[in-house]
Image (cartoon, helix red, strand yellow):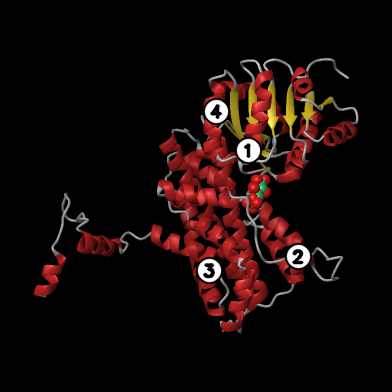
Amino acid sequence: MSEQKCEIGLIGLGTMGHNLVMNMADHGFAVAGYNRDPSRVDALLAAAEGRDIRGAKSFDVFVELLRDPCAIMMLVPAGKPVDGVIEQLLPLLKPGAVLIDGGNSYFQDTERRIKELAEKGIHFIGMGVSGGAEGARYGPSLMPGGPAEAYERVRPVFEAIAAKVHGEPCITYLGSGPAGHYVKMVHNGIEYGLMQLLAESYDLMKRGLGLSNDELHTIYQEWNEGELNAFLVEITADIFTREDELSGGRLVDQILDAARQKGTGKWTSEEALKLGVPTPSIDVAVTGRYLSALKEERVAASQVLPRPAAFDGDRETAVGQLRQATYVAMIVTYAQGLALLREASQTYGYSLDLEGVARIWRGGCIIRAAMLEEFRRAYLARPELPNLLLDPDLAMAMREREGDLRATVQRAAGLAIPAPGFMAALAYLDSYRSERLPANLIQAQRDYFGAHTYERVDREGTFHTEWGAMSAVG
Ligand code: 6PG
């Protein structure tokens, strides 16, 4: 084994950290691992099998294993644990050291850490890591942001371990400050939106159309073979075949219908509200999880508010329309998330390149999907595109299928199957393409009750009307 110092070190040897170390070592890098619980260090060394992996059970031994300027990646839970590790490491680090936070940290925490550490000469990179355990081991999508010169120190390692699509690594330097964690937050918001759509499609087909788990498996598998090819569609198809060892039936039917969340979807919605960017497909996915968690209340309500309808149409037509509706609603969900990134980039000065974002989301991450190739093409053609729906090819794809989305929403409403994701996508589409919206009435109402003034379509300026007096005359 080489006596050279390690290229990089990892703190936090849970499944993700352990797998990232193995991935780095497989790409020929000498890697050091540390974990608070020493048994995880032993487990890593036991798995090393000839790879250049070294373990440390204290921070000083760990830092000693690393070459200068040292590069350390943390994979510890977001929040206080990140600050705790930084505090312990700091006395051991020399100026020029590069610290990378690979967790789902809140971007404002990352911004604070970048500033605090820069004062001490330490570079801090906030890097979104997506793809779960499998991605970490064989190729994640990586979303780094922070000081550009520090990224150069670690670029060779991360480009080597990232997922590859047509030979291109699913990593790019995204921008200064917390740009990396911001992009990962929005990635997760889109993830919530897509999962909500797939859950609604399942509900429509199972409860609405009465399809079996085997039929659902086959349908999602077919979807995944076409333009809906996506990691989340693929795993959805798989889920329906898993037997339950305890009940003998299918596992999916035994899982409690109350979705949990760690907060990244909510952060995305909060940010969108703060920046004034409409992201209804993400918002309904977050509230959909809250509604699902009201299990006891829902059980009680189902007694007093029984579901009124039953399906008596053609199942094949309904499933075909649902497939097209899912495609359209997914595009709308990505479009909202990417529009938020565009606005955030301008507001916070991240200089995000959305073509690059679409490129690194094509592989490795949870929201990877064939349609990202289309989005990449759209941004290559028009880097300043305000919204994906304005791309002529995507607009054409939407126009060809919007009837199916409309039919799906009507069917869901008729069957009393909740479909807030599909409904939000349709309402967004119909709002976004409306040359004229009824906001003139809202302006009139505001001016009526609060003298908030309004603008006119036919001349410049700000106007106010004494509405009450006019009404009294009329
Ligand atoms: C990823 C995932 C990952 C995690 C989610 C789960 O990109 O690999 O997004 O980060 O699975 O954070 O989020 P919730 O617990 O909020 O559903």
**Residue picked out by circle 4:** 114
* 395 displayed left or right of 308: left
Q: Are marks 1 and 2 in contact (CB under 8 Å)?
A: no
- The residue indicated by pointer 2 is 240
Say what secondary structure mark 4 lies in: helix
Type of amino acid at the residue the image marks with label 2: Phe
Instruction: Assess whether mark 4 and mark 1 are in contact (beta carbons under 8 angstroms).
Output: no
Q: Which residue is painted at 60% across and 25% down in the image?
A: 151
**Mark 1 / mark 4, whichever is N-terminal:** 1
Q: CA distance from mark 4 to mark 2?
A: 44 Å
- Camera-near label (2 vs 3) is 2
**Residue 80 shows which numbered tag?**
1
The mark lying in front, picked from 1 and 2, is: 1
Q: Nearer the viewer, mark 1 or mark 4?
A: 1
Residue 119's place in the image compared with 73, above or below, is above
Residue reaching furthest left? 473
Label 3: element kind: helix
Position above or below: 309 against 472: below
Q: Which residue is mark 3?
A: 404
